[in-house]
Amino acid sequence: MIRPASLALVAFLGSIAGSAQAQNTQNVYRPTGTRIISQTEQADLQDGRRLLKLVGACVVGRFPAEAVALLRTGNPEAVAYAEAGVRDQDTQSPIALAQCLHEALNGTQVTMTMRIPERNLRLTLAEAAYLRRHSAPLGLSADSPVVLAGRPVLIGSTPEQSTAMGQFADCLVFHAPAEADALLRGPTGGDSERDNARALAPAIGQCLAEGQEVNFTPAILREYAADGLWARSEAMQAAQPSEETE
């Protein structure tokens, strides 16, 4: 857990609920009169995060323009579908969410339902869209603003919280664009993600008021990095519209 000097705001990791039921076709014991092979199981949080990252990368890979449009203007149908629950056998989902969930499961004999809050959907698409757009860390000019004015913020549950968290994300990326990039480009969970998150500690200290303290988990820092890097990427694209490619 990262423990730098802190910011007076609270960041919440939206829940990603997933349940899986094995479809085992082997000849295993089952009580007489029942067709149940195994009980529904709650997915592990880290496994859920990894699965969501795979789903986001799949969606952006298949429908890059639609994913960017959702990030910019919203897509009520896609958001409603994700929040209601994406199933691996449903072919009617917007932006191929269900198909991408099935692909992420990699052919395993599992039926899964994943409920994705809007915040998490946007963050995972922002991460994937950023990584698709940039093959290397952003190069920021010396006159780049520390905080981007008037940009959409993907994190925060109230306008006030979104403003504070967006400013922190902008500052974090300004002071450590390469380290923030490495966090997104690296694996989800485990020691590698923890090490990548620790590399942001000096930048975190530069973005917080002296004497303040807070605990940042790698998952939370990943959200700040995704929000900040996507916003910075969008600002750079807007400054060079003729070169924009999705």
Image: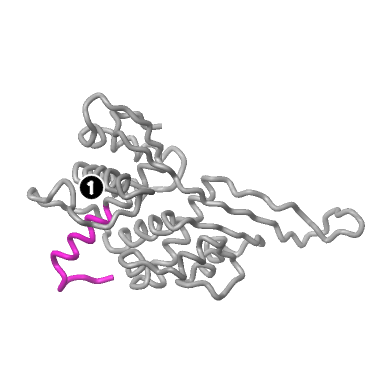
Residue 9 position in % (x across, y down): 33, 37
In this orientation, which residue lies closer to the viewer: 5 or 22? 5
**Residue 182 in view:** no
Q: Which residues are magenta?
A: 229-246
Residue at position x 56%, y 62% in the image: 85
Classify residue 243 as left or right of residue 218.
left
From this viewpoint, which residue is outermost toward the bottom?
A: 92
Residue at position x 29%, y 34% in the image: 7
- Magenta segment main secondary structure: helix
Q: Toward which corner of the image does residue 207 lie, by quadrant?
A: top left
Question: What secondary structure is found at the residue carrying circle 1?
Answer: helix
Q: Toward which corner of the image does residue 175 lie, by quadrant?
A: top left
From this viewpoint, which residue is outermost toward the front?
A: 159
Q: Label 1: how many residues lie within 10 Å, few (<14), some (14-19) or many (20+)?
A: many
Residue 49 position in % (x across, y down): 48, 50
From this viewpoint, which residue is outermost toward the left?
A: 143
Q: Is residue 147 above or below residue 231?
A: above
Residue 129 position in % (x across, y down): 33, 62
In this orientation, which residue lies closer to the viewer: 61 or 19? 19
In this orientation, which residue lies closer to the viewer: 29 or 113? 113
Instruction: Report the amino acid beneath label 1.
Output: Asp
For mark 1, what is the residue?
A: 170
Residue at position x 37%, y 37% in the image: 195
